[in-house]
Amino acid sequence: MAFDKTMIGEILRPGSDEEQRRQEERVRSGFFGTVRRALRHIPFMEDVVASYYCAIDPETPAASRAILFAALAYFVLPTDIIPDFIVGLGFTDDIAVLLTAFRAVRQNIRPDHYEHARETLGTIRS
């Protein structure tokens, strides 16, 4: 089964209020552990972490928050279309989903989200 734009669209489609709540909980509980594991594999990790801060920001429009939480929830799942433990390939599907979400909502990711991201990544890397 090919991983294509249709599948990415399905992943990023906001679900019901209940599904969005579950996605947010999944992201809040597993995000930073996944960031630590994926740090060497995702070259735009600052954008990913800034997207997290954008998603949890109550000032971010609801539609953008829903897209980001859907993408970030996919990112924190260890067994998705290409399981993350497969060396060299495990994060390729995550990268496609994250880039698509980032492009869709980048106008809502503010400089303060990036500042938080840089601080967080500095802490994680040290």
Image: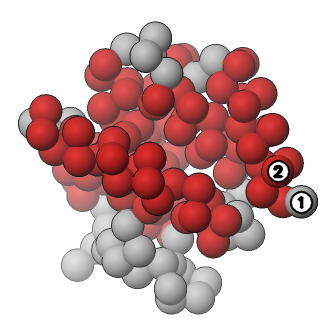
Residue 41, compared with residue 7, is above or below; it is below
Q: Given the current orientation, which residue lies at the most extreme bottom position?
A: 86
Q: Given the current orientation, which residue lies at the most extreme top position?
A: 59
Amino acid type, callout 2 = Thr
Q: Position of residue 81 (x, y in %)?
A: 32, 74
Residue 92, compared with residue 5, is above or below; it is below
Residue 19, compared with residue 57, is above or below; it is below
Q: Dot 2, crowdedness within 10 Å: few (<14), some or many (≥20)?
A: few
- Helix, strand or loop status at disc 1: loop
Q: Residue at x 53, y 81 (%)?
A: 89
- The residue nearer to you, when weighing 58 against 5, is 58
Q: Residue at x 54, y 17 (%)?
A: 107
Evaluate whether residue 10 shows in this view: yes
Q: Position of residue 27 (x, y in %)?
A: 41, 50
Q: Which residue is mark 2?
A: 123
Whole-angstrom CA distance, mark 2 to mark 1, is 5 Å
> Circles 2 and 1: CB distance less than 8 Å?
yes
Q: Position of residue 92 (x, y in %)?
A: 51, 69
Q: Which residue is mark 1?
A: 126
